[in-house]
Amino acid sequence: MNPILSAVIIVAAIGLFCAVILVIASKFFAVKEDERYLKIRSCLPGANCGACGYAGCDGYAKALAENSCTKTNLCTPGADAAARQIASVLGVEAEDVIEQVAVIHCYGDCNHTSNKMDYVGIRSCEAATLLYGGDGKCVYGCIGLGDCVRVCPEGAICIENGIAHIDTRKCIGCGLCTKACPRGLISVIKDVDTVLVTCNNTEKGAAVRGKCTNGCIGCKKCEKNCASGAIKVENNLARIDYELCTNCGECAKNCPVGCILVSDFQGLHRYVEKV
């Protein structure tokens, strides 16, 4: 027999034998997955944002399948629809999901502040902060190089006039942008809240005014005019306790620099429900 043909036959035979062994092994040593896990996993949006407190959608689905005490309303991106589907799979009552949206605490755009230098380097906020805190005069404000834009799965963030802007109508509240911002300018709030402090600068008023005309000067007028005591000036910066806030808007009316915004931040899920 031709030696080349013999070699081919031997190799093919070995390959066929190994394939048969692997098929048999896969049948006998297969680990059966919980059918409930697979059904629950299909209910989740797959954002893998970690907002639920678990390591992605797989971790949350596994916890739900294995532990009856795990809450069904922890998936913010999936909202009430996901919670209802999960509850149906588990045969329990659906729990309400608190819809959330991301907001940015900086409105220091090109109309309110200016640059201290021309930045030439990697187009990344995290990289820019390593060089004198970025190119802007305010080292507390948005750098505007789009780290948050790149991680948003819904395209809800864009860079306009030098800073990031969040379209809450597209936001699913996953919180990935909060982790991407090196300045910690982005937070996640309930989408029924309507008041936002659009500044993050903790310097004294005079220093703030020299860098940004939209910055909080710590005058405490907002604090004095808040009937519910929801807003306090701490470390030269106004901060809102949303558990106490009644959304009356008095703080915004009395802010002399206009850094407190009153708006409708309702997110994608609630907006879709209205439509």
Image (tube, rainbow, N blue to C red):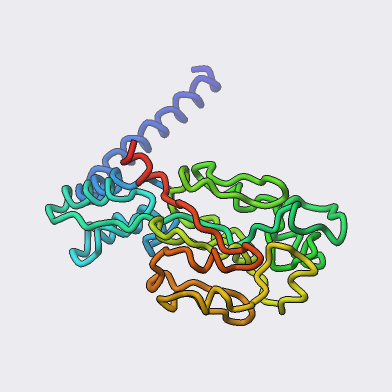
Viewer-side residue, 116 vs 247: 247
Viewer-side residue, 231 vs 11: 231
**Which part of the image, by quadrant, shows the C terminus?**
top left
Q: Position of residue 131 (x, y in %)?
A: 81, 64
**Residue positioned 71% across, 57% down in the render:** 143
Q: Position of residue 126 (x, y in %)?
A: 70, 60
Task: List the single residue furthest toward the top.
Answer: 1
Q: Position of residue 213 (x, y in %)?
A: 73, 63
- Give the quadrant of residue 220: bottom right
**Residue positioned 41% across, 50% down in the render:** 266
Indicate whether 117 appears above or below 24: below
Task: List the single residue furthest toward the right.
Answer: 117
**In the drawing, does residue 126 fall left or right of residue 186?**
right
Indicate whether 186 appears above or below 170: below
Viewer-side residue, 184 vs 21: 184
Viewer-side residue, 226 vs 152: 226
Report whether residue 30 is seen: no
Report whether residue 1 is seen: yes
Task: List the single residue furthest toward the bottom.
Answer: 235
**Residue positioned 37% across, 60% down in the render:** 52
Number of marks in the rendered image: 0
**In the drawing, does residue 199 fall left or right of residue 133?**
left
**In the drawing, does residue 16 fall left or right of residue 184?**
left
